[in-house]
Image (spheres, grey):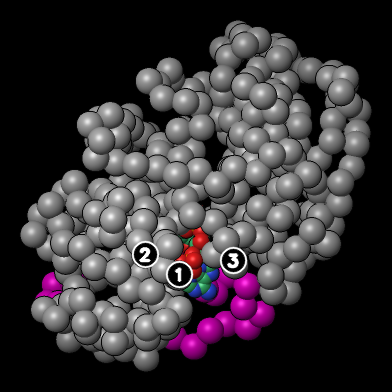
Amino acid sequence: MSTAINSAWHLASRPTDLPSAANFAWRETTLPALADGQVRVRTIWLSIDPTNRIWMNDADSYLPKLELGEVMRGIGIGRVEESRDASLQAGDIVQGMLGWQHYSVSPAKALSKLPPIPLPLSAHFGLLGHIGLTAYFGLTDVAQARAGETLVVSAAAGAVGSLAVQIGKNLGMRVVAIAGGAEKCRWLSDELGADAVIDYKVEDVAAGLARTCPDGIDVDFENVGGRTLDAVLGNLKLGARIALCGLISQYNASAPEPGPANLAQLLMQRGRMQGFIVLDYLDRAPEAAEKLIAWHLAGRMHYRLDVSDGLESAPAALSKLFSGANTGKVLVRVSAE
Ligand SMILES: NC(=O)c1ccc[n+]([C@@H]2O[C@H](COP(=O)([O-])OP(=O)(O)OC[C@H]3O[C@@H](n4cnc5c(N)ncnc54)[C@H](OP(=O)(O)O)[C@@H]3O)[C@@H](O)[C@H]2O)c1
């Protein structure tokens, strides 16, 4: 493909429930010439995230809403091919909102040059980057997690959840992991070190928490919300903290879900529930990266990638997050490194 021609997925319609390929339109356009301060980047890795679904809604979130017809927003890693800004050179590897497209033209200042790491480039999404920061600071900063405490992690076999489980273990916590399916639960207990698992597809979560947390929950790393969060609230210990990371069970809801029935337990147990967005921790990325890389190199932190090849596969890759077809981090390999 000539570098003058770009192909991209554009947002064509807004989903009313599960997102599908029908919500996107594939278009080819001619890339504009660079203006001063701009760079052209070839996308290598595209991160597929549950928040992509939030960005498709007709409402602002922690970022402005995406307009119909725009290139689908997405976090990517790519190589600078041409630069008209002194801060970046052709060949540099950068990360930023590259979008669901082969090439992007953006201001150099909107991108971050990635530091070299002793790991494959994809580890910037599997272990580090927004995924690692979310798990690390959600536990250490938002939840103030401490050794000896009981931690519950939902969507535990996913990208963020699988790191949160292992960070909890590295911090000396007792970790209970909730996930859907026997194979995910086996991975969590046999390979990632979870002390107990709840397969929510075969066991009621409230019953599972009563079974695995007889003394209650100190910390909940909440990725799911809905009935899972409600079950957690019903099993809190005095002074419990809930790091509200995500609510994936509600992202496809067409109407607001009822609030948790067990909210009173947050009051009775003097608990704290705090939402957080990883963007607020970007300036502390080196702190988390140092720890995560050290644990990984010591064999105490694993990550798994779920890779689809080709930009064409991005809509199908997004669907995996809501069917639970993924284990670990969902990525699209858009072009060769
Ligand atoms: N706050 C932040 O800054 C921030 C940053 C990144 C991610 N997040 C949040 O973190 C959570 C995990 O994100 P991720 O990127 O790591 O995705 P992920 O966990 O790799 O993938 C999503 C997983 O969620 C589970 N799931 C989907 N629908 C569900 C439902 N209705 N009920 C229960 N489980 C369901 C599935 O696993 P099962 O097979 O186990 O069902 C699926 O594999 C999401 O809520 C996301 O929005 C927040």
**Mark 2 residue crowding within 10 angstroms, few (<14) / some (14–19) / many (20+):** many
Q: Amino acid at mark 2?
A: Cys
Q: Position of residue 104 (x, y in %)?
A: 74, 29
190 lies left or right of 159:
left
Q: Identify the element where label 3 is drawn.
A: helix
Residue 270 visible in the shown view: no
Q: Which residue is mark 3?
A: 322
The amino acid sitting under disc 3 is Phe
**Residue located 26% across and 80% down the image:** 209
Give the quadrant of residue 221: bottom left
Taking 45 as reference, is 191 left or right? left
Give the secondary structure at mark 2: helix
Relative to 229, does residue 247 appear above or below in the rendering? above
Q: Is mark 1 within 8 Å of ligand 1?
A: yes
Mark earlier in primary sequence (3, 1): 1
Magenta-colored stretch includes residue 246:
yes
In the depicted structure, whether residue 254 falls above or below residue 167: below
Q: Are marks 2 and 1 in contact (CB under 8 Å)?
A: yes
Does mark 3 have its CB less than 8 Å from ligand 1? yes
Q: Magenta segment range?
A: 237-259
